[in-house]
Amino acid sequence: MIRIALVLLALFLTLPALAADTASLFGRDLRTLNGAAPYSQLEGAKAILIFQPRCQWCALQARTIQKMQTDGLLSDNFIAVGINGRRPDLLKETTRMGLRLPAYQADTSFFKAAKLDRGTPVMLLVAGDGTLISKLRGYQDETVLTQIEAMLQRF
């Protein structure tokens, strides 16, 4: 319960600072990794799972999100963006992970706009206009993912 409160507090405390100095994360031309709709056409608030090759926690996070979507607990507002790997490595990773989320390959401008560093998994919460709302590092359990889903409905 304390973890949830801390996560929510972090989300709301970082909102003004992130929104003030981050370029839109939408409208970019990221390459799809699994036949998803073009990234440049995304609309609405999204939670973006940042993953990289050979990241066990990333695979676990993707499985948790997909299970919750199958169970009807999460909407389709969750997507994935791969970093720190060549395209063949990211394609192999999406297959290894069994990734059904729309998946894309990050480019340098996305990496900079999202203010990413090297660690994964990371969950980016993005408003409908592409403004970065918050960034959560590490694995997010079902309780936190439910809170993220509720927050996305407000943006």
Image: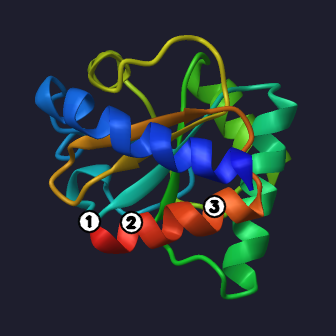
Q: Residues within 10 Å of mark 1 (few under 14, many from 20)?
A: some
- Type of amino acid under label 3: Leu
* Distance CA(mark 2)–CA(mark 3): 10 Å
Q: Residues within 10 Å of mark 2 (few under 14, many from 20)?
A: many
What residue appears at the point 26 percent right and 20 percent down from the top-left corner?
109
Dot 3 or dot 1: first in sequence order is 3
- Residue at which label 1 appears: 155
Foreground residue among 78 and 133: 133
Q: Position of residue 137 (x, y in %)?
A: 61, 30
Q: How many numbered marks, from 0 up?
A: 3
Location of the N terminus (image quadrant): bottom right
The residue indicated by pointer 2 is 152
Report x, y in % for residue 83.
55, 24
Q: Foreground residue, 124 or 92?
A: 124
Return the residue at label 3. 145
| Mark 2 and mark 1: Cα distance apart in space | 5 Å
Q: Quadrant of the C terminus?
A: bottom left
Residue 104: % across, % down: 47, 43
Q: Which secondary structure lies at badge 3?
A: helix
Tell me which label, 2 or 3, sits earlier in the chain.
3
Q: Secondary structure at mark 1?
A: loop
In the figure, is residue 98 to the left or right of 155? Answer: right
